[in-house]
Image: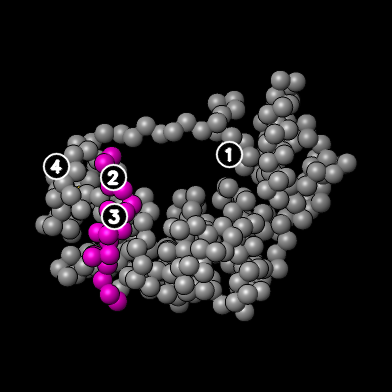
Amino acid sequence: MDHARSLLRWYRKHGRTFPWRSGKLDPYVVLVSEIMLQQTQTSRVSEALPRFLRQFPTVFDLARAGNGEIIRQWQGMGYNSRALRLRDAAKTIVREYDGVIPSSPEILLSLPGVGPYTSAAVACFAFNTRVVVLDVNVRRVYSRLVKRQKYTTDVEPDEVLTRFAESLIPQRTSSQWHHAVMDLGATICTARAPQCTVCPLASLCPSNNVLQSVSRTRKKEPEFRGKPQRIWRGRFIEVLRGQKPHTHLRPAQLFALATQSPLSAHEEEWFTAVLNRLEADGLILRTRWGVRLAD
Ligand code: SF4
């Protein structure tokens, strides 16, 4: 297993350090950090995770948290409904598994807010289970290793990558291996400009020094005033998070504070639809006094 030795040697020297990788391994911390990392950059999660864990040091504390309390602690992370799903997952773990984070990927997958990637990642990083973990960095690295690719954007189907990964992952160091592949993808085997000359896997890589750089066109998200709708959702929550607990804002007041301009008649329909969605997601409450963060 020369490839494993070279990659792990490289990782010990050049791997990234993050709060969720340091100290004593705690499956609860791995679960929280993996949910945070689903849609938030590592730098933001590095800042938010220690604060979140001070507030909710155990799965039992998290399971008891109310909606408003947990949304406040999710500050700066975006995609706030993830926080509620994470709390719901904690409730299930306390109720059905006595507060012990399950190690089986199948059971993890049944928890609220946990999809195929997160269940595999928690099983791998918290329990060192030999399971295939595919994120965007790992997909890219494996695609380039499995066959000679022409363009930097070329990615193989998951079935191909899974079969390939099963033959590569070492028996006893699945967690380290996956951290290493992720770090290689983030720093050396990057999306646009892979640095093959310093890559620890160059000697076995068929795409070594042959990739032509092309940029991927991103799918357009629904927009309002030139910004994606999710940004506005985040801003409305941010304004409510800044109020004292149980303070209501009139909808027009909330809109004006978040957008820095008054609500016009032609924007009302869009704004109402956003509030409906935030309410359905359990993030806000609407009462006769106005809008506030959920309890
Ligand atoms: S040799 Fe180049 S393309 Fe192959 S894994 Fe390393 S950085 Fe990526």
Q: Which residues are magenta?
A: 153-172
Q: Are marks 1 and 2 in contact (CB under 8 Å)?
A: no
Vertical position of residue 122 compared to residue 225: above or below: below
Q: Are marks 3 and 4 in contact (CB under 8 Å)?
A: no
Position of 219 compared to 191: left or right? right
Farthest-out residue, left: 203
Determine if the magenta segment contains residue 67.
no
**First along the sequence among labels 2 and 4:** 2
Which amino acid is tagged 3?
Leu
Which mark lies nearer to you, 1 or 3?
A: 3
Say if disc 3 is inside 8 Å of ligand 1.
no
- Residue underneath mark 3: 161
Residue in the picture at 67% in, 48% down:
281
Separation of marks 2 and 4 at Cα, in angstroms: 15 Å
**First along the sequence among labels 2 and 3:** 2
Give percent across and percent down for residue 73.
Answer: 64, 57
- Residue underneath mark 1: 230
Residue in the picture at 27% in, 59% down:
163
Q: Which mark is residue 210?
A: 4
Separation of marks 1 and 3 at Cα, in angstroms: 31 Å
- Residue underneath mark 2: 155
Query: In the figure, residue 21 lies in which quadrant?
Result: bottom left
**First along the sequence among labels 1 and 3:** 3
**First along the sequence among labels 1 and 4:** 4
